[in-house]
Image (cartoon, rainbow, N blue to C red):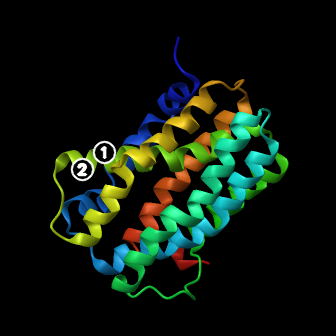
Amino acid sequence: MVKLSCLWQQENQEVWSAILEHPCVQNLGRGTLGLDQMARFIGQDAQYLNEFFRVLAIAAAKAPSSEWKQVLGSHSQNVLVVEDQLHHRLGPVLGISAESEPLSVTVAYTDHLLRIAWSGSFSEIIAAVLPCYWTYREIGQQLGAQGMPDNPIFRDWIETYQGAAYGQAVTEILDIADALEDSKECHIAFARSLRYEYGFWSQAYDSNYGFGWR
């Protein structure tokens, strides 16, 4: 029997593959990504995580079991602690301003997640947040297997997302997803988030992506 998470992924294989093959991802792995592009990516990721931790906190409140409440509550706090540490290490090196504004994909993506968090079911929330978790692990593992770049900025990012701690968090979310009841809304939420993930890499790679709209 195909796991529910794998079914969602298989339905969106074209987008999934496009993310892994995205020039922004591949250049990050080679260490040839422009520092301005990496700065845009990290700056927008910080903006994204400001809202993502709220989505996870709402998911924890809606979780139907105490075990899942604990897992998601822990993940929400880790967004503020663990990944925030990565941004604090890389931000000053890349010259990222704390006052940077969210770009168009960041706004659309976080609005999408928050809307589902407040008005959707618990299953929809998990389907919506899963692409962020899952693709970052796959990217980290893929790039790490290709060999680490010399640039410590890129190496630090890859090591974070190929690491055991992050991998465990992804496994926990996948286990929750695979225990859910499927619905049409879950398929839509997963597919839409996955497309926003592609757009997120694209706006980092090309400053004109989305016509620069905020």
Residue 103 at what x, y percent from top left? 56, 75
From the viewer's side, name the closer residue of 39 and 108.
39
**Helix, strand or loop under label 1:** helix
Identify the residue at image location x=26%, y=51%.
Answer: 143
Look at the picture and state if 176 lies above or below 133: above
**Closer to us: 72 or 54:** 72
Residue annotated with mark 2: 144
Check contact, mark 2 vs mark 1: CB within 8 A.
Answer: yes
Marks 2 and 1, how far apart in space?
5 Å
Q: Is residue 175 above or below residue 86?
A: above
Residue displayed at 39% across by 49% down: 19
Residue 167 percent across, percent down from the top left = 43, 43
Residue 175 in the image, given as x and y percentages of width and height = 57, 30
Q: Nearer the viewer, residue 156 or 102?
A: 156
Residue at 35% x, 75% y: name it. 37
Quickly name the residue at label 1. Answer: 141
Q: Is residue 182 left or right of residue 43?
A: right
User: Which amino acid type is shown beneath numbered disc 1?
Assistant: Gln
Determine which quarter of the picture holds residue 23: bottom left
